[in-house]
Amino acid sequence: MKILRRLSAFQIIIISFALIVLLGTGLLMLPISSKERVVTPFLDSLFTATSATCVTGLVVQDTATYWSTFGKCVLLTLIQIGGLGVITIAMWIAWISGRKIGLMQRGLMQESISASNTGGIIRFTLFSVKITLALEALGAFFLSFRFCKEYGLLDGIKYSVFHSVSAFCNAGFDLMGTKEKFSSLTSVSSEWYLNIIIILLIVIGGIGFNTWNDIVVNKFKIKKYSMQSKAILLTSLLLIVIPAVYFYFFDFSDSRWSMSTSHGVLASLFQSVTMRTAGFNTVDLSQMSGGSTVIMIFLMLIGGSPGSTAGGLKTTTVAVLFASTFSVFRRNKQTKMFGRSISEETVQNASAILMLYLMLFMASAVGIFTIEGVPIRECLFECASAVGTVGLSLGLTTQLCSASRIIIILLMFIGRVGGLTMIYAAVSKKQSDVAKLPQERITVG
């Protein structure tokens, strides 16, 4: 406990995630985890465990055909832990076991689930766990009507639970490789029932527990929602609708896809939703046009919302940056949104997060391009997918050498725990700007 008290909340969160990844790696290396009962190489196991814990979905082995039932259970557990957060699950276990949760633990939970304060944090954490389990169970129930029909009762339930948890946690792991390896959901791209359930689970898991708490408390009285919830809902809606319209008119309405109008609309909607950290795909993404690929990279970098199962820059970061930009255009001194002002610190954090993700994304893509010598488009897509914890690929993942895989592993880890969390964990708490330096103007733009 003395050691823990010396560590900051950010350091404990990072260490917790790292330990879970290493534990998962060890379990996946066991012969019992693979169908062939062989020892899975360390780097393959580390890559897969990181991808599952960081709810990404990038894989070097097909989930359905390579891993045994035990291995799939390990992956599902890692996905669930990664979706809820290590600290959240640890505190929930402590609560149900009757242990006292002190201020330090409450502070950890606050940082882990992006809560605004520690007041009511236990209630909020329990709410997060309960709504997660309830919605995953509901999703599995509805999916069972589809999967039990094709795979029988027991296998159908297995498929339903796995895909429900994976979709809600925005993980992107699937068991459809039995039809074709690494095929994701391409074999069911025209099925409205299955696609809509997966879409709903992805969206619900990606908007964040803070927003769901607002919805539960205030119902449809949107005016009473917090500014953050309003920003999340509006930004999420725009990031679903606008790309979906583009995908349909500039890709899926084209005769080369041989899709009916309804099939094209469904494919457009699914790709628009899944790009923001979900990791499933219902079409061959390598066949998408150049413009669509750029939009997909943009969506992957944005990701989901704070306090959710998703990763990425977060919708609120984008909303704050847009609000700040419009304030500059209008020459307003304050950044405003929904009749409220946004603190300068929040704007600075949003700018720092954007720069951090862009630098990681670009530097890693150039690094992999240099190492692998593959088209830069594939490198950019792969790195955006990793740092945004999305899990989509243009087919590059399985071809990467050890050095490139390590780069992707680091991107997935940073993308899940958060860039600022990594920086705050490394930098001392002490203020370095106690004394104010002379101010001088610098021209920008």
Image (cartoon, rainbow, N blue to C red):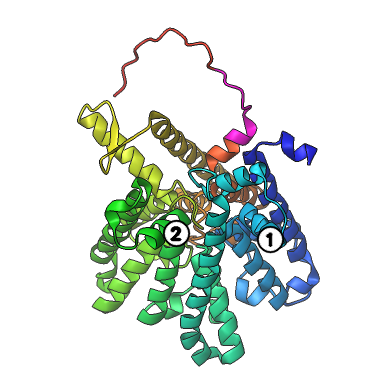
**Residue 352, horizontal then vertical, whole percent:** 46, 33
Asked if residue 284 lies left or right of residue 373, the reply is left
Q: Is the magenta stretch mostly helix, strand or loop?
A: loop
Give, as a three-letter code, the residue at label 2. Answer: Gly
- Which circle marks residue 206 in the picture? 2
Residue beneath the point at 22% across and 31% down: 329
Residue 353 drawn above or below residue 406: above
**Residue 42, horizontal then vertical, whole percent:** 75, 58
Residue 355, quarter of the rendered image: top left
Q: Could you say whether the residue bearing mark 2 is in a helix, strand or loop?
A: helix
The residue closer to the viewer here, 71 or 258, is 71
The residue closer to the viewer here, 156 or 107, is 107
**Residue 293, horizontal then vertical, whole percent:** 37, 56
Q: Earlier in the sequence, mark 2 or mark 1?
A: 1
Asked if residue 220 lies left or right of residue 198, the reply is left
Residue beneath the point at 61% across and 27% down: 429
> Dot 1 surroundings within 10 Å: few (below 14), some, or many (20 or more)?
few
Residue 425: say if magenta. Answer: yes
Give, as a three-letter code, the residue at label 1. Answer: Ile
Magenta segment: 424-432
Where is mark 1, residue-wise?
A: 93
